[in-house]
């Protein structure tokens, strides 16, 4: 996950701007099969760190940023950590979801759950939008039917792994 910052022992001289074990100890450190995971909370902002090797008491640490497709996200997460460690506001997350996008995703997941439970598109639309908006006739050509189908398709896309794209910045087509 690109928002988790890989931390390595620093080889440069400690000038106070490098992360130390004292800061790491303030968070929740957990050992896992792939290394050590740290959840560091600074002024109500969570920063997730990962160390390949166990933390050492007198060592200084630095962020290791891989130059890959997620570099921009990793750099942003590292900068937010740096700002927080230096007593400054961490700033906004890389890309927050708009309220409209959140609502659409919530509707898509509800529609998916209903479809998996065997409900028809009409029943799903009634559950999501209320029966008063569902026409008695002309359901097949109603816009709400098409919207419900698109919501179910979005939910299926998320279920098949599309949820990972929520963590990445939307890429514009050129």
Image: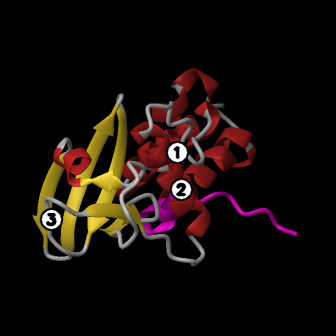
Q: Which mark is residue 25?
A: none
- Upstream in sequence: badge 2 or badge 1: 1
Q: Residue at x 37, y 50 (%)?
A: 113
First along the sequence among labels 3 and 1: 3
Query: Is disc 3 surrounded by few (<14), some (14 to 19) or many (20+) residues within 10 Å?
Result: few
The quadrant of the picture occupied by the C terminus is bottom right
- Relative to 168, 29 lies left or right: left
**Disc 2 vs disc 1: Cβ atoms closer than 8 Å?**
yes
Q: Mark 2 and mark 3: span between their CA atoms? A: 35 Å
Instruction: Please rate how many residues cluster around mark 1, counting C-alpha atoms within 10 Å: few if below 14, some from 14 to 19, many from 20.
Output: some
Estimate the spatial distance between the alpha carbons at disc 2 and disc 1, rounded to whole Å.
10 Å
Could you classify mark 2 by the number of other residues whose Cα lies within 10 Å: few (under 14), some (14-19), or many (20 or more)? Answer: few
Residue at the spot of label 2 = 166
Which quadrant holds residue 58?
A: bottom left
Q: Which residues are magenta?
A: 157-174
Residue matched to label 1: 105
Where is 66 relative to 63, above or below? below
Q: Residue at x 34, y 35 (%)?
A: 42
Foreground mark, 3 or 1? Answer: 3
- Picture quadrant where residue 103 is located: top right
Query: Which residue is at the far right?
Result: 174
Q: Is residue 72 magenta?
A: no
Query: SS for tag 3?
Result: loop
Q: Position of residue 69 (x, y in %)?
A: 60, 75
User: In this rendering, does residue 20 appear at all?
Assistant: yes
Label 3 and label 1: CA atoms lie apart by 43 Å
- Residue 17: x and y, percent? 42, 50
- In this rendering, would 73 be left or right of 111? right
User: Does residue 31 appear to the left or right of 13 in the view shown?
Assistant: left
Q: Which residue is mark 3?
A: 56
Query: Magenta stretch containing residue 172, yes or no?
Result: yes
Q: Secondary structure at mark 1?
A: helix
């Amino acid at each position: 996950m690109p928002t988790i910052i890989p931390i390595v022992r620093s080889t440069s001289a400690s000038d106070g701007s490098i992360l130390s074990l004292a800061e790491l100890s303030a968070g929740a450190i957990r050992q896992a099969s792939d290394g050590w995971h740290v959840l560091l909370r600074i002024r109500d902002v969570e920063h997730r760190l990962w160390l390949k090797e166990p933390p050492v008491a007198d060592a200084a640490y630095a962020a290791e940023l891989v130059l890959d497709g997620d570099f921009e996200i990793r750099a942003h997460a590292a900068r937010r950590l740096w700002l927080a460690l230096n007593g400054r506001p961490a700033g906004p997350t890389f890309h927050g979801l708009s309220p409209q996008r959140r609502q659409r995703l919530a509707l898509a997941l509800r529609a998916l759950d209903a479809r998996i439970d065997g409900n028809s598109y009409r029943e799903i639309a009634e559950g999501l939008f209320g029966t008063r908006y569902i026409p008695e006739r002309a359901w097949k050509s109603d816009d709400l039917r098409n919207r419900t189908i698109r919501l179910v398709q979005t939910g299926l896309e998320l279920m098949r792994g599309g949820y990972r794209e929520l963590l990445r910045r939307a890429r514009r087509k050129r």
